[in-house]
């Protein structure tokens, strides 16, 4: 039966099929590797072994922070500054700082300093450029420390 061919299947046909198959596989791998390296923001931890030694300490700190019962709501104002409402924290004693990170690492990290507003909320002194940012907030009241991360658009 020669329904789809006009001649015999030769080694040249087989070679073309194999070369085409591997060319597609290699092209897809190169494309995916370039996409992955272009969107990776950088190092997660400097040394994973050292980070593993601190893991239990981080869990203990997280349990202490959760026991405080604090919460925060961060949003971007029309002028690009970050407004934060902090709940459960002692109103007059809290100092708030933050680091804003671009999730894909396309922009440098930005340190944010906050000023307390009349209603008890906080407003950053610096504006963030447009786009999506991951804001790591740290609130301190005396010896108590509390941290959280939120996306701000």
Image (spheres, grey):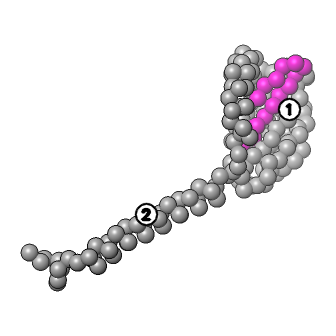
Give the Cα distance between marks 2 and 1.
51 Å
Local packing at callout 2 (Cα closer than 10 Å; few below 14, some 14-19, many 20+) is: few
- Residue 76 picture location, percent across and down: 76, 45
Give the residue displayed 53% in from the left and 59% down from the top: 32
Report the residue that reaches farthest toward the front: 11
What secondary structure is marked by label 1? strand
Examine the rendering and report whether any part of residue 78 can be seen.
yes
State the residue position of label 2.
Answer: 25
Q: Quadrant of residue 11?
A: bottom left
**In the rendered picture of this protein, how many numbered marks are placed on residues?**
2
Residue 15 horizontal side relative to residue 37, left or right: left
In front: 47, or 97? 47
> Does the magenta portion include 98?
no
- Residue 33 picture location, percent across and down: 56, 58
Q: Main secondary structure of the magenta part?
A: strand
In front: 141, or 8? 8
Q: Quadrant of residue 10?
A: bottom left
In front: 87, or 35? 35
> Does the magenta portion include 137?
yes
Give the residue displayed 68% in from the left and 29% down from the top: 52
- Residue 31 picture location, percent across and down: 53, 63
> For residue 96, which numbered disc appears in the image?
1
- Residue 99 picture location, percent across and down: 80, 41
What secondary structure is marked by label 2? helix
Q: Is residue 120 above or below residue 36?
A: above
Quarter of the N terminus within the rendering:
bottom left
Give the residue displayed 13% in from the left and 77% down from the top: 3
The residue segment tinted magenta is 133-147
Q: Quadrant of residue 43?
A: top right
Report the residue that reaches farthest toward the bottom: 6
């Amino acid at each position: 039966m020669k329904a789809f061919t006009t001649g015999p299947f030769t080694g040249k046909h087989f070679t073309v099929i194999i070369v085409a198959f591997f060319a597609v596989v290699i092209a897809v791998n190169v494309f995916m590797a370039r996409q992955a390296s272009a969107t990776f923001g950088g190092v997660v931890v400097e040394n994973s072994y050292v980070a593993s030694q601190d893991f239990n300490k981080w869990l203990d700190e997280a349990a202490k922070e959760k026991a405080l019962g604090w919460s925060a709501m961060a949003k971007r104002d029309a002028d690009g500054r970050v407004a934060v409402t902090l709940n459960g924290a002692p109103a007059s004693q809290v100092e708030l700082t933050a680091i804003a990170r671009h999730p894909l690492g396309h922009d440098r990290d930005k340190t944010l300093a906050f000023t307390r507003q009349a209603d008890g909320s906080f407003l950053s002194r610096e504006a963030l450029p447009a786009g999506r940012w991951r804001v790591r907030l740290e609130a301190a009241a005396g010896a108590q420390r509390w941290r959280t991360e939120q996306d701000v658009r």
